[in-house]
Image (tube, grey):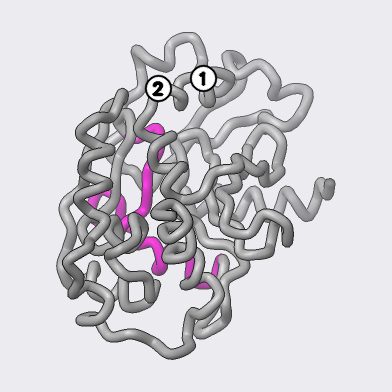
Amino acid sequence: MKTKLLYFLIFIPLITLGQNKKTLFELTNTNESAWKLVQNWIKNAEVKVVVLPKDIVRANIEIETAQVTTQSPMGAIIFETGGIIIESGIIRILGSGNVKLNRGLMEWNRNKSFSQEEKPKFLLIADDVFGGFFAINGGSFSSEYLGKVFYFAPDTLQWENLDLNYSDFLVFCFSKDINEFYSGFKWKTFDKSFNITDFDKSYSFYPYLFTEEGKDINSVTKNLVPISELWTLYNDLQNQFPK
């Protein structure tokens, strides 16, 4: 029952944004904040997890825009953190924004998954250093798997269903399972050379990983570029190389 409750608390903002808006007090004044639950997951994490400090002004704006309460893990992360960094930046879970991860969750989604009071058909919740994006499906990827987390894979140019809800996704990020998930993206010297401090950047690969020439991750050219550039690039490439 608790899992189902968390699912609906997360998914409702995707379908009610702009309607019957709750106040900041209503969204944050609760004795049942999910932050303690998230902190417990972090405490027991099998990988390195760093919680970025929040800016209270940004946190207030982000949670009011998201219209999700701190009773849900998503609301708790938005309100309590500037973001969460997994394994020194391999995965970046969006919160309310920080100088090192200068993208609040709703700020980042604006004009990508929604504009003004439009209802989002998906919601970007995290991304990785390899140019992959994680999003909650609000109907854009599949009408059958609403509320599930999908992964945009740079080696296929497709959104792939991970069959996880938001809470499941967090648990996955805090586990050693991410090592297997990213095994195909790591080149031979990755673990020795990986050092990133700007979590708004990710690797651009050329030849593109989805091409035959780009299949060997060790031989492609690798450059760190703004994640916003990769979002635009991959959307353009999807139009050029439709499924």
Q: Position of residue 32 (x, y in %)?
A: 22, 63
Name the residue rendered at 17%, 63% in the picture: 55
Label 2: few (<14), some (14–19) or many (≥20) C-alpha neighbours in 10 Å = few
Q: Is residue 84 above or below residue 77?
A: above
Q: Is residue 140 above or below residue 42?
A: below
Q: Nearer the viewer, residue 24 or 71?
A: 71
Name the residue rendered at 46%, 50% in the picture: 166
**What's the residue type where badge 1 is placed?**
Glu
Q: Nearer the viewer, residue 46 or 5?
A: 5
Disc 2 element:
loop
- Marks 2 and 1: CB-CB under 8 Å? yes
Disc 1 element:
helix
Disc 1 marks which residue?
Answer: 180
Q: Position of residue 197 (x, y in %)?
A: 27, 37
Disc 2 marks which residue?
Answer: 176
Q: Is residue 132 left or right of residue 104?
A: right
**What's the residue type where badge 2 is placed?**
Lys
Q: Position of residue 239 (x, y in %)?
A: 78, 55
Residue 92 magenta: yes
User: How far apart are labels 2 and 1 at the CA level?
Assistant: 8 Å
Residue most extreme to the bottom: 20
Q: Is residue 206 left or right of residue 34?
A: right
Task: Find residue 75 and report its image quarter.
Answer: bottom left
